[in-house]
Image: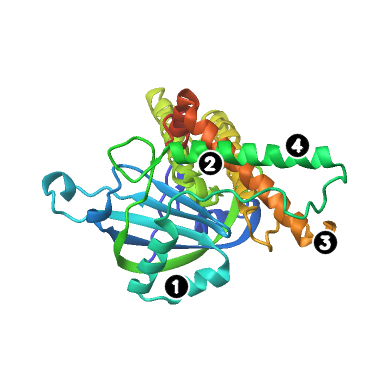
Amino acid sequence: EECTLSADLLVAADGANSFVRRALGSFPMITHSYDRKAVTCTVELDVRKGDMAKTAFQRFLPYGPIALLPVWNSLNNADEDAPTYANVVWSTTPSEANHLLSLSGAEFITTLNHHLCQGPNVNPPLLNNNNQGMPHIPIIGTIAKEMDSLLRTANTALTMGTWTESPSRNYFRMPPASAKVVGPIMGFDLKLSHVQQGYTAPRVALVGDAAHTVHPMAGQGLNLGMGDVYSLSVLIKEAIDSGMDVGGTGLFLDRYNQERMVKGLGTVGGVHGLHELFRCSGSKSSPSINVTALNSGENVNTIESIVGLGRSLGMNVVNGLGPLRRAFAEAAAGAAFSR
């Protein structure tokens, strides 16, 4: 049986493969494949080995990050013995993702805990022992090695000085161990996408993944979508309060489009930049490095080591500066959807 529905405004909130967007055919997309796949599932935590304490954990591996994200459970407030759950999002290469998807639940938990529940890594030396690539001037080589040692020592001190296994201390700490997988283990390809020309058409507005998708490494996809909903709902309320047709005039939809295009492109571009920065981390096949343009594999390792040390120092500096750290945390948490 067929029926016809009519509305003043159609909001397309039907995901990355939006039927509404594709059916209209008026929303060309910018897309970029990361050649990565995300493996995701829900796990029950082993509370004997720590808990989430309202904290999201993320560990960066050579092929992509693992995220352990807290899940709200109303039973936890009423029953101290209620299980604690977390969501896992593991971004990696398609071949490794397919291997993870082939594992049993017990095997997946063992692999997850092995990769996630480790202390901080120490950055490798920037210079190799045989001084390859260094000028043949003794004093230059000596100064370079001393600077290398000083930077790595300072960074290690900053890292270890804020790391603890105790959940009662407000520093970097060990993620909790997972006990078992709850539900299916699923995978999906990772890509960047964003509408080219705008979020709106006559009497149509796109929100969430229908308008944009981002890499999950910074957890900004949900925040960006919630920002779309917040912005559009405010404008709909304005139209209703003023007795105007929200979809019958460009006044409100144009404002929505202007607000969210700026925010969307900025967030998508920022997350993409972070991905490119963190993907250069010890993988010889990292697309961020043009191996054929370099002299040797050791030069590749040197560049990757420099990038890795720079990232690590940057993260430690941010962590050590309270106001800057809080500003980043508020932005990452989507503290102000209206901005």
Real-space Cα separation, disc 1 to disc 4, in angstroms: 49 Å
Task: State which mark lies toward you, 2 or 4.
Answer: 4
Residue of label 4: 143
Q: Earlier in the sequence, mark 1 or mark 4?
A: 1
x, y percentage for residue 189?
54, 63
Real-space Cα separation, disc 2 to disc 4, in angstroms: 20 Å
Residue of label 2: 156
Q: Classify mark 2: residues with Cα within 10 Å, few (<14), some (14-19) or many (20+).
A: some
Real-space Cα separation, disc 2 to disc 1, in angstroms: 35 Å
Name the kind of residue labelled 2 in the image: Thr
Q: Quadrant of residue 89?
A: bottom left
Q: Earlier in the sequence, mark 2 or mark 4?
A: 4
Residue sitting at 47 percent across and 27 percent down? 327
* Secondary structure at numbered mark 3: helix
Q: Earlier in the sequence, mark 2 or mark 1?
A: 1
Q: Earlier in the sequence, mark 3 or mark 1?
A: 1
Mark on residue 101? 1
Name the kind of residue labelled 4 in the image: Ile
x, y percentage for residue 291?
78, 60
Mark on residue 292? 3
